[in-house]
Amino acid sequence: MLKEMNIKVAQLSTSRGCLANCSFCVTKLYHKAWRGRSAVRMVDEIEDLKKRYGIRAFNIIDCSFEDPQISGERLKEFSSEILRRNLVISYYVHLRAESLKDVDINLLKLLKKSGLVTACIGLESGNEEDLKLYHKRASLSDVMNAIDICKKLDIHIDPGFINFNPYTTIQKLDQNINFLKKYGYASNPDYLLKSTFLYKGTQLYELAKKDNLMLRKIEKGRCFRFMEHGIVDLYNYVYEYLKEHEQNKLNYPAICHSASFLNVGISCMKHLLREDGFKSALEVLLEYCRDVLKINNSLNERNSDWFSALIELGKEGWNREKADNLSRKILPQEFLSESALKYSFLKQRLKIQMTKCNVSLELVYLINAILF
Ligand code: SF4
């Protein structure tokens, strides 16, 4: 929390450990069992931070907010207590996809009402094989179900996704890009490039080490070799193409940030403006969201078409010249920089319009922290 910068967002840790055991994750190395504070003590801390510092946006950094059991009493008590004390806050949590399989929808509605605006969910993959490799408890249908439920309840998902791992194949990439495109996540080019980091001691690290796939140092953002011949050309090309964009100062990070549609901060602002009854500011924000969605949709199409075309090229035999031609045709650098400019224009417009709306000082702080 950076009080001196008027950034009024607090991180809160209410538990340690996770009941799952994903093969790339270090949590189990540090916390063998789950332990957590009571719901009442969690809300006491929130109330105290709100009273003392005016904080109303909370990032709950627990590995899995739903442990030890999503249908248990802890979450119900937590959300009921926030509502009972009329705290009017917004919060961000981490959830697992399979937990939403048999969840009582009324509990989710209660959480939403109490301020749950964003759930970071480790979707991780668009293919079953990789979900098994990662030892995810969720199947692909659980993942898709989680997305659908959150969408229905207007809970924003901040997705965890791993496109590349040492055992990546062309077929898996094909499935991943179709998945990303279907849900609009391909608008963020970062997801195309995401590779798993292999931490020493994790199950996936040990497997890759046994298969002699570990690199001595990080190369182009990854610490492993690919088992399947040919993947490396595709990966390196995507990496260089997107990083070239960054080097040209065409604002690649800004694209990635803005393209995470209705990103964490926007969801939080939407909730607080609505709860506080700032109708005109909310309308301004919703207009911004609608315009961002248009840019995102076109990025989603282009990015995924580009990546799919590169996959097809990988299938027939990698050829750098053909790859360059495809990139110029489908995803020219000009298109990316135009998108970055459009995002930046919308942000500036939002900033100007917001300053004209009569919102409370604490929300002005929050808006500044989130947007600018
Ligand atoms: S669900 Fe998240 S925190 Fe838990 S083991 Fe998997 S990656 Fe780690």
Image (tube, helix red, strand yellow):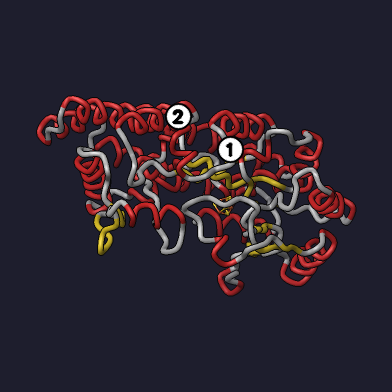
Quarter of the image for residue 46 reads bottom right
Q: Nearer the viewer, mark 2 or mark 1?
A: 1
Residue 343, image x and y in percent?
A: 42, 42
The total of numbered circles placed on residues is: 2
Asked if disc 2 and disc 1 are in contact, CB closer than 8 Å, the reply is: no
Label 1: few (<14), some or many (≥20) within 10 Å? many
> Which residue position holds label 1?
138
Q: Residue furthest front?
A: 210
> Which residue position holds label 2?
179
SS at mark 1 in the image: loop
Quarter of the image for residue 190 reads top left
Q: Residue furthest right?
A: 84
The quarter of the rendered structure image containing the N terminus is bottom right
Residue 277, image x and y in percent?
A: 76, 44
Residue 192 vs residue 25: left or right?
Answer: left
Residue 6 vs residue 341: left or right?
Answer: right
Residue displayed at 33% across by 57% down: 209
Residue type, label 2: Phe
Residue 8 vs residue 260: left or right?
Answer: right
Residue type, label 1: Ala
Taking the image as drawn, is residue 315 in sight?
yes
Residue displayed at 85% across by 52% down: 77
SS at mark 2 in the image: helix
